Image (cartoon, helix red, strand yellow):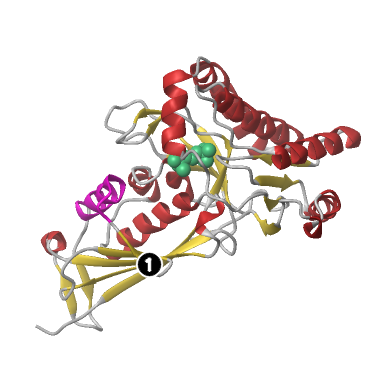
């Protein structure tokens, strides 16, 4: 009865939606009211690294986030752990002389250590990378045979947007029709090499944590906004088709138009919520004006902007040259030393490895 530890480490980047998910039709399974499309970032920026370990010596499941122990008792963690455990297979490590039978997994406990290479509190989608990485690393440890799109349906139960981080490149989360959520999965539209001219820049407008979580924000919107169903039923389905086409044909003007309009409509739906939800602030609005003016003066869009549930701007430049100009403009309009609340930039190529 020699003691042993078996470990797996995985790294997963976050993703940024260009057609937004906002609103659930089932809160516990996390089923959305519309399809969404995102781009997965390069793993060197905004990514989570998770190590999962199993040992007969562990007495209960435990998890540490950025070195601090956190509770695993929440329903979202429990759903992911249960779904992965139920799909575990036999595991054998000949070198270490370890043999774990499929049925043993129910009684073995896990230690999970997760790190974000960016400030968790910065309001930059950390749960997407976190749950995708947790599910992926556990699936590898437990020799789960299912493919990434099946795993995406498990990650979705941790955080909706997490299902899209199981793939690199551009990814679509298909809302699905079934009540059990088995068809609410992510699929890759194109891989990370397909459109590698794009450069994504994140302007950190505020590193404070958002006031309204996406969970309660979505609930309030679905309960009170007369606009949100119109968006989900009449607007998004058409935009998803157009966005897929724009991405596949690398049509930047169409891509930028759809990305900016969809971000603006998502924030309009937040404003249409009672009481209204304000995720963007004055600096966010000034960034939008800057980009809109620039795009108009060039005659064709150079940069797309999109904002999630917070004031930070995600700016997508059509190529490296435009990205360098964009950085110059941002530094000119929001000089860091002037006390403006735009305080740092993270520049990274879109693309990903898993
Ligand atoms: O998956 P959540 O609960 O973090 O919600 C994400 C919501 C948005 O980031 C605003 C939109 C999206 O599609 O990622």
Give the magenta-colored segment's residue range: 72-86
Quarter location, residue 302: top right
Residue 61 visible at all: yes
Question: In the depicted view, which residue is nearer to us: 340 or 354?
Answer: 340
Q: Secondary structure at mark 1?
A: strand
In the image, residue 196 lies in the stretch drawn in magenta: no
In the image, residue 75 lies in the stretch drawn in magenta: yes
Which residue is drawn at the image coordinates 49% and 31% (left, top)?
22
In the picture, the quarter occupied by the N terminus is bottom left
Q: Is residue 97 above or below residue 261?
A: below
Say how many tags the image has: 1
Instruction: Say whether residue 229 is left or right of residue 81.
Output: right
Instruction: Say whether residue 343 is left or right of residue 131.
Output: right
Label 1 sits on residue:
68
Q: Position of residue 332 (x, y in %)?
A: 86, 52
Which residue is drawn at the image coordinates 67% and 57% (left, top)?
349
Question: In the depicted view, which residue is nearer to us: 110 or 285?
Answer: 285
Q: Position of residue 67 (x, y in %)?
A: 40, 70
């Amino acid at each position: 009865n020699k003691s042993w530890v078996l470990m797996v480490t995985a790294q997963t980047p976050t993703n940024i939606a260009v057609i937004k998910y906002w609103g659930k039709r089932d809160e516990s399974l996390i089923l959305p009211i519309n399809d969404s499309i995102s781009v997965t970032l390069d793993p060197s920026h905004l990514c989570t690294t998770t190590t999962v370990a199993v040992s007969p010596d562990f007495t209960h499941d435990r998890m540490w986030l950025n070195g601090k122990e956190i509770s695993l008792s929440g329903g979202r963690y429990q759903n992911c752990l249960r779904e992965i455990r139920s799909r575990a297979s036999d595991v054998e490590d000949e070198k270490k002389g370890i043999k774990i039978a499929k049925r043993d997994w129910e009684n073995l406990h896990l230690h999970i250590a997760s790190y974000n290479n960016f400030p968790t509190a910065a309001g930059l989608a950390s749960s997407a990378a976190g749950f995708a990485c947790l599910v992926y690393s556990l699936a590898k440890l437990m020799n789960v045979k299912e493919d990434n799109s099946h795993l995406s349906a498990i990650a979705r139960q941790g955080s909706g947007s997490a299902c899209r981080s199981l793939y690199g490149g551009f990814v679509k989360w298909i809302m699905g029709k079934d009540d059990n959520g088995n068809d609410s999965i992510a699929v890759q539209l194109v891989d990370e090499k397909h459109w590698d001219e794009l450069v994504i820049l994140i302007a950190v407008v505020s590193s404070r944590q958002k006031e309204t979580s996406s969970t309660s924000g979505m609930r309030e919107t679905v309960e009170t906004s007369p606009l949100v169903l119109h968006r989900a039923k009449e607007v998004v389905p058409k935009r998803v088709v157009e966005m897929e086409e724009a991405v596949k044909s690398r049509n930047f003007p169409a891509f930028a138009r759809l990305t900016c309009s969809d971000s603006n409509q998502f924030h309009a739906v937040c404003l249409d919520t009672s009481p209204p939800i304000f995720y963007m602030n004055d600096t966010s609005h000034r960034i939008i004006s800057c980009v809109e003016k620039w795009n108009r003066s060039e005659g064709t869009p150079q940069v797309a902007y999109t904002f999630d549930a917070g004031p930070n701007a995600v700016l997508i430049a059509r190529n490296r040259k435009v990205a360098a100009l964009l950085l110059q403009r941002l530094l000119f309009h929001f000089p860091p030393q002037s006390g403006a609340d735009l305080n740092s930039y993270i520049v990274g190529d879109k693309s990903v490895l898993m």
